């Protein structure tokens, strides 16, 4: 899995360099793993603008400008919050693209409405681009985090190639 993630990160990096774009990340449940994967590639300073691990709701509001109203209405693990996290990171780091991740990595913390493994992955970008994908992973905590990073990098690569 680690080699596959590195290969995907390298493809993302090459596509960002080719287009002259930058990326940043706003992470919750992945705890910095997305940015770690992006910076595992030599030369990543040419396209990685930065990232924020906003684990608490307070950090999401303070750092990424996620509105308290959105958190109350939808909860931290929601499509709306993932979108606001991505837009907030885009603004904070002045990058071309921003990835966001919020979810329930497990093993606890889930409910009937929001099961363990539920994750929202956001992508914000040029011309008002905002896309959020809902995923439900079936792995353990580490596997769910890795799957979220892989899905986020894949989402970005698709946007860069499309």
Image (cartoon, rainbow, N blue to C red):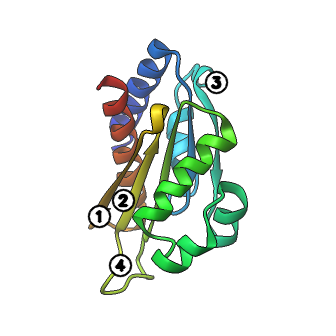
Q: Nearer the viewer, mark 4 or mark 1?
A: 4
Answer with the quarter of the image where residue 22 lies: top right
Distance from Cα at disc 4 to Cα at disc 1: 12 Å
Number of marks: 4
Quick one: 112 or 34, which is closer to the camera? 112
Distance from Cα at disc 2 to Cα at disc 1: 8 Å
**Which element type, helix, strand or loop, lies under badge 3?**
helix
* Mark toward the start of the polypeptide (4 vs 3): 3
**Which element type, helix, strand or loop, lies under badge 1?**
loop
* Mark toward the start of the polypeptide (1 vs 3): 3
Distance from Cα at disc 4 to Cα at disc 3: 36 Å
* Mark toward the start of the polypeptide (2 vs 1): 1
* Mark toward the start of the polypeptide (4 vs 1): 4
Residue 3: x and y, percent? 36, 35
Distance from Cα at disc 4 to Cα at disc 2: 18 Å
Distance from Cα at disc 1 to Cα at disc 3: 31 Å
Crowd around label 1: few <14 · some 14–19 · many ≥20 (10 Å): many
Quick one: 95 or 1, which is closer to the camera? 95
> Label 1: which residue?
137
**Mark 4 and 3 residues: CB-CB less than 8 Å, in contact?**
no
The C terminus is located in which quarter? top left
> Label 4: which residue?
114
Q: Nearer the viewer, mark 4 or mark 2?
A: 4
Answer with the quarter of the image where residue 130 lies: top left
Crowd around label 2: few <14 · some 14–19 · many ≥20 (10 Å): some
> Label 3: which residue?
45
Q: Nearer the viewer, mark 2 or mark 1?
A: 1
Q: Residue furthest front?
A: 127
Residue 21: x and y, percent? 52, 22
């Amino acid at each position: 899995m680690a080699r596959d993630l590195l290969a995907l990160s390298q493809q993302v990096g090459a596509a960002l360099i080719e287009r002259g774009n930058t990326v940043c990340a706003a992470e919750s449940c992945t705890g910095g793993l997305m940015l770690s994967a992006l910076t595992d590639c030599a030369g990543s300073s040419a396209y990685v603008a930065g990232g924020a691990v906003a684990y608490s709701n307070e950090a999401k509001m303070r750092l990424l400008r996620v509105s308290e109203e959105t958190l109350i209405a939808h909860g931290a693990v929601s499509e709306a919050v993932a979108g606001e996290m991505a837009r907030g990171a885009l603004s904070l780091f002045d990058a071309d693209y921003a990835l966001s991740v919020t979810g329930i990595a497990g093993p606890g913390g889930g409910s009937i409405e929001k099961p363990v493994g539920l994750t929202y992955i956001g992508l914000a970008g040029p011309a008002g681009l905002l896309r959020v994908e809902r995923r439900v992973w079936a792995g353990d905590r580490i596997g769910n985090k890795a799957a979220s990073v892989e899905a986020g990098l894949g989402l970005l690569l698709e946007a860069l190639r499309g």
